[in-house]
Amino acid sequence: MPSLTLAAPTPRRRLRPGAWIAGLLVLAFLALFLVLPVAKVFVTAFVEGDGSFTLGHFSAFFSQGLMREAFGNSLYVAVLSALFAALIAVPLAYVTVRFQFRGAMLIQTLGVLPLIMPPFVGAVALQLIFGRSGSINLLLQDAFGFTLPIMEGLNGVIFVEAIHYFPFILMNLTVALRNIDGAMEEAAMNLGCRGWRLFWRVIFPLGLPGFVAGASLVFVKVFDDLGTPLVMGQTNLLAPQAYLRITQVGLEDPLGYVISVIMIAFSIAAMALSARALKGRDFSTLQKGGAGLQRRRLSAGASAAAYAWIGLVLLLTLSPHLGVLLLSFARVWSFSPLPDAYTLDHYATVFQDSSGMIGNTLLYCSLAAGLDVVLGVTIAYLILRTRLPAREWLDWIATASLAVPGIVLAIGYLRLFKGVTVPGTDVLVTSTWVMIMLAYAVRRLPYALRSCIAALQQVHQSLEEAAESLGATKLRTIRRVVVPLMAGGILAGFVTSFITAAVELSATILLVSADSQAPMSYGIYLYMQSVAGRGPGAALGVLAIVVVALGTWLSHRVAERTGSRFAPQPQPLDPSRP
């Protein structure tokens, strides 16, 4: 039997001038549109008008009762939203992974659907269903004489945010549970550990990395959310206060920058604490061949109860979609469980008055996603294929945008580019739609970058060496060999950036300077500000959901086809060979 030898990894080749040029261009982009705007926010929060250092702005912030209340409310809403999101996601992930279910994949897919709807759109729909005069409370009042104050005050914000963001925990925890070695569970059961004790002492601790990753994302997203509190009339939180200070007091108001610094600090702290909570703990297993948790059968009674519970959860989490759909067709919906009459006029209004918003969304998001994949491919190549000094910093800086709230980035743009005009004109840079597109690109860059890195890691370097040995230049090799082999990851990154940018409101609401520049997310927000406009707003929201859903479906289809394209194919047997 021939001996097997492990091939040594192919060393990275000598550094070419093109790598330096590409690295400097990427660094310049990140510095100009991410690092400097955020740094400008920090500097403004810590300096006086004459440029001297001060902590007085922070003292002024904490000396005001409204600001202290907003700070406490933001923490309260973010923590409880993550908690209630976990109460929805953890049982759903465990049950669908641990037990045999018909339609388990469909259940998990439906569980992710809340992410494709802007949370502030879901807030309006949930008010119609669970609000004081909503469908559920009207039925409860008629039948039992009481109502549930689900959508009152900050509790309503928590309810909306938990329903919208729980898929982050569901997706991460599902993957983590599937990767658990089934032998660990069998060993625990052989020692008498079963039921709740088995879950709490063995399975959940092994899946903790996925849970912590999802929960920290929920905390950051809720802490930074602007649209949902504004639509629900809750301005006593940090993000709405930052928006109000900048728009009502002005760019020179230091408290707006103090709030921005606090929001960034807590976003970074949440990610750092999530990493620290897992530091020094070993979650690895010896699983081989995909031998994950054994999927067990439920008894007839337990299966019926599980399906009933899952159906209730999915009905709750999908109720915003149902509410928006009904509202988009409702002629009148007030103080009644269902609309009194239906019409298509709202869609006619949208296509007549808001067609420009749809076009703007497609333009901004396409350009932003295209820029993201160009940057993502470049950074991925510099990291994995070159020896550029400090190349990991490009990854770290690009990924850091996850911790920068959209409203903070927009404030940084307004401050950094204040008074700067487009060359050769008197038009302010901050009044152009290009700033909106750039904000989308910077905020969504980490999604495309991760896809591009994953795609390039699956392209063996020997393929590039073979092309170069045949006379191809480095640029031609990248264009004709590397990029085509990365096509699936590139397209997945493009679609992910596109669909997430399509529902961006935090940066949009500050950077839109004219109605002609407004994308769909801003149009939905404007419509939803008045009762008369909620029908067209819901219709525009449905169109946004359709666009995002189609993009999500397309990304999955492309990923599947690419995976099957590059998977090893079975070869026919040759009877002439022994």
Image (cartoon, rainbow, N blue to C red):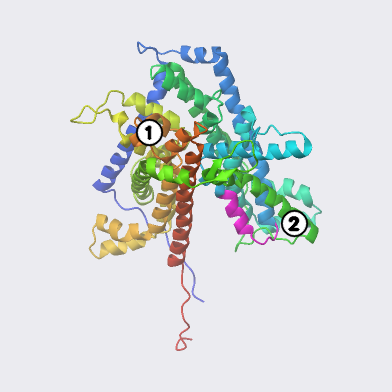
Frontmost residue, 415 versus 464: 415
Q: Camera-side residue: 195 or 326?
A: 326
Task: Give the residue drawn at x 61%, y 61%.
Answer: 288
**Residue that sits furthest to the right in the current view:** 192
Q: To which quarter of the image does residue 472 belong?
A: bottom left
* Label disc, if present, on residue 187 of the rendered structure: 2
From the top left corner, tell me how far across and down residue 74 is, in percent.
57, 27
Q: Nearer the viewer, residue 295 or 514?
A: 514
Amino acid type at image mark 1: Leu
Check disc 2 and give the amino acid type. Answer: Ala
Mark 1 residue crowding within 10 angstroms, few (<14) / some (14–19) / many (20+) = many
Q: Earlier in the sequence, mark 2 or mark 1?
A: 1
Query: Residue pushed farthest bottom?
Result: 576
Tell me: residue 298, above or below residue 320: below
Magenta-colored segment: predominant secondary structure? helix
In the image, farthest residue toward the left? 424
Q: Is residue 408 rendered to the left or right of residue 67? A: left
The spot of residue 464 in percent (x, y) is 32, 60
Q: Is residue 356 visible?
A: yes
Reply yes or no: does residue 156 show up in magenta: no
Span shown in magenta: 99-112
